[in-house]
Amino acid sequence: MRKRRADAVLLNLPEATQREIYRLEVEESLTLADIQSRLAMPEDEGGLGVGHVSIGALSGFLRHWRSMQWRARLQEAAATAQEAVDDGIAESGDVMDEAILAGIREWIVDTLARGQMDPKDAKSLVGLVLKGRQQLLEARKLEILEKKAAAYDKTAEAVEDDNLTPEERLAAIREGLKI
Amino acid sequence: MNAQQKQIVREQILLALQSAAPVTLPTGTLQSGLRIVGFDLSEKEVEYELEYLQGKELVRMKRAALSRNIRRWGLTSAGIDYLEEKGLD
């Protein structure tokens, strides 16, 4: 027969009670012994009326809850990372290659998992990065188009310049059209 | 750490990698998460456990997309099977 987990009693309590036990540790920073006393204390005396629970069981229970919170944070971070990248692409177009997008996703997850940034800020930042990249690409395109237009103007001038020899004209056309 | 604690740490690592999937996690993030759960391990100790799990083919290592020096870790299909078999997923 499978051994019953020591923390099974606590994990089978109503969720609100479980949450309250976890809160005692996280928000009130009570020691295990203090929480143990609070669990044993009847409800009408300000306790939780759960009865005696061993320190080992309590420790396992709290570890389970901390783990759940951490994993929920990771799941949220992964979802936020994907959402931020999807939103950024929808708004700015496909301006980054997949390796950079993967890097952005990794950075968001790491930052959020460590609680170093708010998910909204992460999304805004990714939006700004992608938008900035889009503007940079558009500026480069414009620069190339302007250079091309200037080269064509110069070529057109060479074609109409009667002072050039046929060889000089051909060289100017070749230069202008980059032949 | 005793054998039981090591087992819990390894399972916590697998669960964390499952939660973050498809994004992989670097050792430092796993280390800070393990601290939240209640295991104060050095980065080297976490790396050791990760390499053990890699040896069992439950996790895989890849280089970070933006920095090749950073090792990141993800769950393999064998790792997913392990969690399912143990009823931990």
Image (spheres, coloured by chain):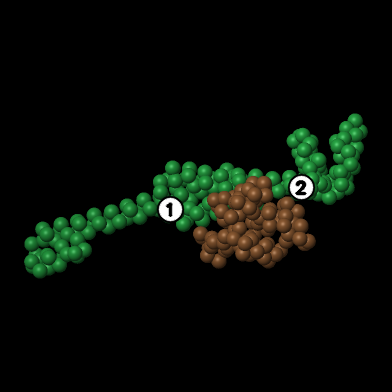
Classify mark 2: residues with Cα within 10 Å, few (<14), some (14-19) or many (20+). few
Residue B89 visible in rendering: yes
Three-letter code, disc 2: Arg
User: Which picture quadrant has residue A163?
Assistant: bottom left
Q: Residue at x 57, y 61 (%)?
A: B61
Q: Residue at x 69, y 45 (%)?
A: A68
Res A96 label: 1
Three-letter code, disc 1: Met
> How many numbered marks have been drawn onto this rendered protein structure?
2
What colour has chain B?
A: brown
What colour has chain A?
A: green
Residue at the disc numbered 2: A2
Question: Of residues A5 and B17, which is closer to you in this image?
Answer: A5
Subunit of label 2: A
Question: Of residues B85 and A15, which is closer to you in this image?
Answer: B85
Classify mark 1: residues with Cα within 10 Å, few (<14), some (14-19) or many (20+). some
Dot in front, 1 or 2: 2
